[in-house]
Amino acid sequence: DAMVIQNPRYQVTQFGKPVTLSCSQTLNHNVMYWYQQKSSQAPKLLFHYYDKDFNNEADTPDNFQSRRPNTSFCFLDIRSPGLGDTAMYLCATSRVQLGTGELFFGEGSRLTVL
Amino acid sequence: SQQGEEDPQALSIQEGENATMNCSYKTSINNLQWYRQNSGRGLVHLILIRSNEREKHSGRLRVTLDTSKKSSSLLITASRAADTASYFCATDYNNNDMRFGAGTRLTVKP
């Protein structure tokens, strides 16, 4: 059974039209991550939540926002998508105890901005 | 920004051969992890090695870690066509940040 579920798997949007991507987990992990992965590149960390504490990467554009209403769910909001935001968006979870443990990834949401 | 670099960027081998990928990183770490990604899919965890460990094995995988050189290697022995994928190392950079290296694209020819 899938433990980290991302929706939608595929999203096509118009330039400037807001998009929300969702991630849910059944693992009860305390950390949730959002990564952006462009074609043939490494995943780039956008931000992560440690419980309710939000940690933004310094180079994450303000256009990207996130919400974590409860332990199980996390959302990525792209307020005004640009063509350069076309990418795979990956959600991951981890249980942090003595250092960061294994990350569990969803299958990703592939976003295309036209 | 990325935490580390990997080499080679791409590797093509025959089935049955061994594949070695290297990862270098920039700062001190608690642990280093290796992941695999099939095309268009999410990443799958392969192995975690802690900063006080030097070598770890899991099936056909062998990982080494040299903290003095800030580098790690992943060896896949007796490769199979199904091992074709991209392989990434990741380090816990700072306060639970998990950052990935550039990755190695492995092709195993049958």
Image (cartoon, rainbow, N blue to C red):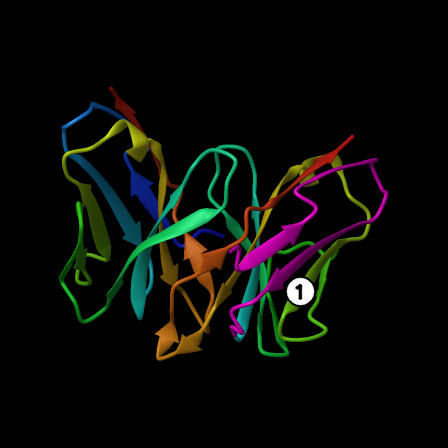
Residue at horizontal 54%, vertical 52%?
A106
Residue at horizontal 16%, vertical 67%?
B53
Dot 1 alpha-carbon crowd within 10 angstroms: few under 14, some 14 to 19, many 20 or more:
many
Q: Amino acid at mark 1?
A: Cys
Quarter of the image where one finds residue B51: bottom left
Q: In this figure, which residue is indicated by the disc labeled 1?
A: A74
Which residues fall within the magenta stretch?
Answer: A1-29
Above or below residue B50? Residue A20 is: above
Residue B80 seen in the figure: yes
Above or below residue A25? Residue B89 is: above
Quarter of the image where one finds residue B92: bottom left
Image spot of residue A59 (x, y percent): 60, 56
Residue at horizontal 53%, vertical 71%?
A31
- Front position in the image: A20 or A41: A20
Q: Is residue B15 left or right of residue B83?
A: left
- Front position in the image: B42 or A59: B42
Above or below residue B109? Residue A93 is: below
Kind of element beneath mark 1? strand
Quarter of the image where one finds residue A87: top right
- Front position in the image: B55 or A69: A69
Quick check: is B23 in the magenta stretch? no
| Count of numbered badges drawn on the protein | 1
Residue B28 seen in the figure: no
Image spot of residue A10 (x, y percent): 69, 38
